[in-house]
Amino acid sequence: MNLDFLINKRASLIAKAEAIVARAETDQRALTTEELQQHTDALGEVTGIDATLRARDAQMAAEVAAAQPAQAARAVQPGQGERAVRGERSTASDAYRDLFVQYLRTGEVTPELRAHTVGTDTAGGHLVPDAWADSIVRKLREINVIRQYAHVIQTSTGILHIPVETSTGSAAWTSEGSAYNESEDVFGEVLLDAHKATRIVKVSEELVNDNAFDLEGYIAQTFAESFADLEEAAFINGDGSGKPRGFLQDAASGTTANATNAITFDELTDLFYSLKPAYRQKAVWVMSDTTIKMLAKIKTGVASDNRYLWRENLQGGTPLSLLGRPVVSCYGMPAPTTGLKPVAFGDFSYFWVAERQGTEVRRLNELYAASGLIGIKGMRRVDSELTQSEAIKTLAMA
């Protein structure tokens, strides 16, 4: 059985199905009968290939268990045997993880690794094991503040259409025998695509071959940090062109400061009450350390009672809050400068982040060989949109 042929054919069929849908979306029309049949036939073949590969995985698992019964009995954990019989593939398995680390260190792609079709693409890249991918997501959440409060979803393919209510209908008092009030909700839609973030990390051949060096941990950490920096900047102020669209692009205006480089608590109070009460229940303040420091230094201005107005900020161990809502420090937010929006207040669950199938890596064996280096290419695909502009309000400087 030629695994490479099946894997490549599967990728070709998926690309064909995606192209059919993409043409219809570009033309803003429904699929024709012929296109529907072509799309169905392509996905049907994919299903058949997946079943074939699952059967092969199950056969390999059975052969290994038969050849090494004692070792297999010690190694199998509850549920693993059943999963192997069903032919399920998981990038969280210890076997796949070991094969993946082997791929990073040696560049060798074994039949066992290729058999996990969920971990390969048409260009030969491999998705990181589930346990490692989860580690990257956790690190992104530690670094990328917006992810902690946004609505993050996983998508597999195509453009995601999100129906959004743009205006609501209303009821009316109606006298007996009179016609019912006709009032409809109005809907629009937000589209979430996938913008590609990439990086190549170069590692010396000595470190790659040194088993004492935690290559997996290093790659996870450095990709996590660089992708987090790139994403957070886009989540805040990205224009949607080749990158995600940031919430500052579409958030509604709450209030404007009187000064070009200073903010008062009165202006923050105006911003607070500009947000509808329903959104205030889960709202958070988002601002940079520069803005937080500015607010923390505001005093009464009365010589006989020169106190800091923001007393909570001086209590060690107490989470920052303003008017009862948490204050989130976000390094990507602008400083209080003419024309910029240094403060956002709202319910960030209406800011949607869509990401495609995790982080993919590929080892580059020859590109840097003359310098004694190995390249590790990483890629993530992600998009973001604020689905309701009224859910987040901003304070702009004069």
Image: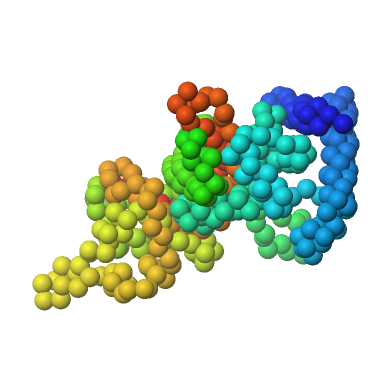
Q: Quadrant of residue 43?
A: top right
Which residue does the image show at 24% across and 53% down from the upper left? 262
Q: What residue occupies the far left of the structure in this picture?
A: 303
Describe the colour scheme in one phrase: rainbow
The answer to whether 243 is drawn above or below residue 225 in the figure is above
Task: Give the image location of residue 164, x and y in percent.
Answer: 63, 47
Front residue (pair 105, 293): 105
Q: Is residue 361 visible?
A: yes
Task: Give the image location of residue 35, x and y in percent.
Answer: 84, 26
Front residue (pair 181, 308): 308
Front residue (pair 304, 40): 40
Q: How many marks?
A: 0
Which residue does the image show at 50% across and 48% down from the upper left? 213
| In this picture, residue 337 sits left or right of residue 66 | left
Task: Give the image location of residue 366, x and y in percent.
Answer: 55, 24
- Quadrant assignment for the N terminus: top right
Task: Give the image location of residue 165, x and y in percent.
Answer: 63, 49
Which residue does the image show at 33% across and 44% down from the upper left? 340
Front residue (pair 292, 325): 292
Q: Is residue 389 visible?
A: no
| In this picture, residue 278 sits left or right of residue 54 | left
Which residue does the image show at 37% across and 51% down from the upper left? 331
